[in-house]
Image (cartoon, rainbow, N blue to C red):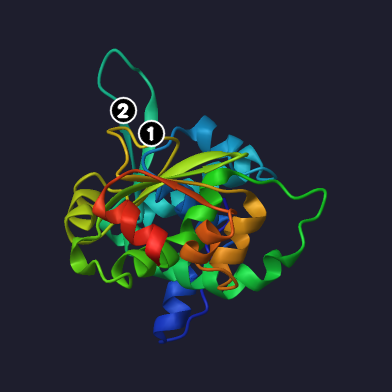
């Protein structure tokens, strides 16, 4: 492999781009923020990336201390990649990029791939704001399962939930909540985009019949009333 190029600038932004500025790297981080992933799973959820490029980016991320590779305990013999603490610190960076890029979701091209958990990043702040701003205060915390036609994902919100997320390296995850959810949102992709772009609140979506919130927890009530 050719030596990595550097901007050779004594600048924090340049140093950051030296580490994560290559094509595909931040999207690999997006996938690993959902938890440990096998190489084959990463390749499946990064349509368009070649196997050589994916392997090269993962190797770079390991060398830069952003990700590690480990073998799952028996009976599984698979290896998984997961983010280090340094890698997980990129979550707010990805959230900011998702917020900045949300307006570009106005139109979906016929060739656009989509995965349900890709909506987690733009929704994290929206869901957290809905829970905190409803009058329920810091008690509106827990796990929210988001169900779309394309699949589902889950996110953890609030103080105690955030601590749990730190414990298992996740703030959101692909698929149903493994231990059950405190609230579940059912909506379509267009409504999800409208929420992430700030065009629709969750509460208004509920009142208009575009979003269904199920559950009887404090968090479910907070989301309905947001």
80, above or below 170, in the image: above
Quadrant for residue 137, please give it.
bottom left
- Dots 1 and 2: beta carbons under 8 Å? yes
Provide residue 3's location: percent of width, then percent of height.
Answer: 53, 60
As helix, strand or loop, the secondary structure at mark 2 comes to: strand
105, above or below 188, in the image: below
How many neighbours does mark 2 have within 10 angstroms: few (below 14), some (14-19), or many (20 or more)?
few
78, above or below 183, in the image: above
Residue 208 visible? The answer is: yes
| Number of numbered discs | 2
State left or right for residue 105 relative to residue 216.
right
State left or right for residue 183 relative to residue 163.
right
Tell me which residue sits at (38%, 66%) in the image.
130
Distance between mark 1 and mark 2 Cα atoms: 6 Å
Provide residue 67's location: percent of width, then percent of height.
Answer: 36, 50
Foreground: 145 or 215? 215
Find the residue positioned furthest to the top.
75
Find the residue positioned furthest to the bottom.
10
Tell me which residue sits at (60%, 44%) in the image.
115
Marks 1 and 2, the one that precedes in the sequence: 2
Residue to which mark 1 is pinned: 80
Quadrant for residue 82, please give it.
top left
């Amino acid at each position: 492999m050719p030596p990595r190029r550097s901007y050779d600038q004594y600048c924090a932004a340049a140093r950051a781009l030296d580490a994560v500025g290559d094509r595909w790297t931040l999207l690999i981080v997006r996938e690993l923020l959902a938890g440990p992933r096998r190489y084959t799973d990463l390749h499946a959820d990064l349509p368009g990336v070649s196997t050589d490029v994916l392997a090269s980016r993962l190797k770079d991320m390991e060398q830069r201390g952003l990700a590690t590779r480990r073998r799952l305990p028996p009976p599984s013999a698979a290896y998984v990649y997961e983010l280090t603490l340094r890698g997980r610190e990129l979550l707010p960076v990805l959230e900011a990029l998702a917020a900045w890029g949300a307006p570009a979701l106005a139109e979906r091209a016929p060739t656009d791939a989509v995965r349900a958990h890709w909506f987690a990043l733009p929704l994290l702040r929206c869901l957290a704001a809905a829970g905190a701003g409803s009058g329920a205060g810091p008690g509106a915390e827990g796990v929210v399962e988001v169900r779309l036609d394309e699949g589902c994902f889950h996110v953890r919100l609030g103080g105690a939930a955030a601590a749990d997320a730190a414990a298992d390296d996740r703030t959101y995850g692909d698929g149903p909540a493994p231990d059950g959810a405190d609230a579940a949102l059912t909506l379509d992709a267009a409504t999800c985009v409208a929420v992430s772009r700030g065009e629709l609140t969750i509460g208004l979506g509920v009142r208009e019949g575009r979003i269904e919130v199920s559950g009887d927890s404090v968090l479910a009530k907070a989301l309905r009333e947001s």
